[in-house]
Amino acid sequence: MTIVEFEKVLQKGESIDTEFKSWVKASSMKERVALAVDEPIAFANSKGGTVYFGVEDNGEVTGCTGNYDLQNIVEAIYDKTRPPLFTEAGEFEYKGKTVITLSVEHDGTTYATTDGRCLRRLGKNSKPYYPDEMSNKYSAVQNPDFSGQIIVESTEDDINKLEIYKLKEKLKARDPESTLSEMEDMAFLSDLGLIKYDAGNLKLTIAGLLFVGKEQAIHRMLPQAEVIYLHYSQSNLEEYDVRLDMTAPIISVIDRLSEKIQDANRIVNVQVGLFRLEIVDFSERVFQEALLNALAHRDYQNQAAVYVKHYPDKIVIENPGGFPEGITEHNIITHPSVPRNKLIAETLQRLKYVQRTGQGVDIIFRDMVSSGKPYPEYRAYNDAVSLSIYSAIDDVEFVKFVAREQNLRQRNFSLFELMILRYLTDNRRISLAIATDLIQGTRDMAQKSLNNMSRDGLIEVSGKEYMLTAKTYEAVKSTVEYTKDRSIQYIKAKEMIMEYIEGNGSITNEKTRELCGFTKQQARSALDKMRGESLIQLVGAGRSSKYMKSSETR
């Protein structure tokens, strides 16, 4: 492990796969070995993880001291567990302190201590793991995708036939050409991977339970698959006035909550030429994509529920489980999809609830930006993620501009183009570096979007930055602001040119372009304007021409 990687672990803190243990506070080596046995068992019975010895609960590194033998620790874990647990041990130095790591993987086997204790990780704590929670619940033939695992105790009686009918009818409406909906019910479920046969007996997978299971079956076999809706009024934003607890199939939850949100929606009419654009508080498509993402990517081994908090000005969706490895709030738009529950994500795709896995975030951002609303707000915690989507329209003129331009060009702006245009309406200028960070993409992605908009006459180069063209300014701002921006640009360029001439005696058009980040025409315009103000004079002609201080200013 590198120092940078370790510091990220310290910053993230304890979680479902990370535990800090003090070495110096343990009274003896015997106590340390006992801790070294319990925590790896809890990780092995969950998702796997690493124990960091020499780190306090608050992340302070106090180190491991004294005489110890890593091999003895590993062997002690092996000898004191049943079945014997293999542990990968390591150590490294951090700011002069030694840190020991003990890592285990989840291999589907249930482990216990030789004296009969069994533990499992819950959030950032290790809890007792009782027999009725163990392998009699899920198949011993483990699937790395939790949603694809077989529920051993499930039977055909746990299937809600009405849910199958609803899925087929919705698929027909979404994809009339699909032949999947014409299949016999059990063949339909089998083709989707929602049921499997174990020793000749029909069993539901986790995904199957969540799509077609009866509510009482979900409550019995996966009670944490709960969605709790809370409504808050304008007069009291601290205490909810409506609560709805749902342990129901995914599509039923989506339909029921979408209906509640739509019933409470207000509409803002935006006139665009001869057309009227209706913008609701919360787009059904945005809300559904956000909730689908939460249900598809939540951690179903975490006992917490998904919360949907409905405020007058925003909806906050909170789901258990942090972002998958590698995804953060700062790359969520462009990072390749990492489905936590692969079978659930694939089922949503095949039922045409999503066009492709991982596209939901793009849709949420696009709809929010084109509607003139604030960006979706993601917040990541150790064991949870929240998403806030807002109802207010920040910029009606921007909404009108986007609608007109897309209609005129008969194409929709890309998400990156929309984000850059929105930034420019608020901040006047943007550099390539800022554009790259804004779209969460590569430099080439940002440059391509800037080039496309430059070619379409929406933006123009201004020095080393980009700004809206006069035509675009007229649509979303004002000609006064455009002129003001251009004037400021000229004033800055004039100061740099005069300072260069003071130090070097003269300046060329080429050097002006390099100095100010101008095009050839922009440099010529600035230099001509300075000549008109009698600040500089042209000396020579052709390639040997250069500009010097005017005799009037010497």
Image (spheres, rainbow, N blue to C red):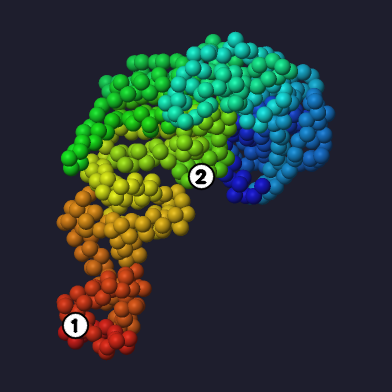
Residue 33 position (above or below residue 63): above
Mark 2: give few (<14), some (14-19) or many (20+) Cα within 10 Å.
Answer: some
Q: Position of residue 268 (x, y in %)?
A: 23, 32
Q: For residue 158, what is the image quadrant?
A: top right
Residue at horizontal 30 percent and vertical 39 percent from the top? 371
Task: Residue at the far bottom: name it.
Answer: 540
Please tell me which of labels 2 and 1 falls first in the chain: 2
User: Which element carries disc 2, helix, strand or loop?
Assistant: loop
Residue 360 position (above or below residue 526): above
Choose mark 2 or mark 1, whichever is in front.
Answer: 2
Q: Amino acid at mark 2?
A: His
Q: Amino acid at mark 1?
A: Thr
User: Which element carries disc 1, helix, strand or loop?
Assistant: loop
Which residue is at the front of the view, 310 or 125? Answer: 310
Left or right of residue 474, residue 505 in this image: right
Residue at horizontal 65 percent and vertical 22 percent from the top? 196
Which residue is at the front of the view, 374 or 411? Answer: 411
Mark 1: give few (<14), some (14-19) or many (20+) Cα within 10 Å.
Answer: few
Determine if residue 208 is in view.
no
Q: For residue 287, what is the image quadrant?
A: top left
**Mark drawn on residue 268:** none
Which residue is at the front of the view, 316 or 348? Answer: 348
What is the CA distance from the residue labelled 2 to the residue labelled 1? 57 Å
Q: Position of residue 104 (x, y in %)?
A: 71, 35
Residue at horizontal 63 percent and vertical 12 percent from the top? 155
Q: Position of residue 441 (x, y in %)?
A: 46, 51
Q: For residue 99, what is the image quadrant?
A: top right
Q: Which residue is mark 1?
A: 553
Q: Which residue is mark 2?
A: 335
> What is the number of callouts on the image?
2
Q: Quadrant of the C terminus?
A: bottom left
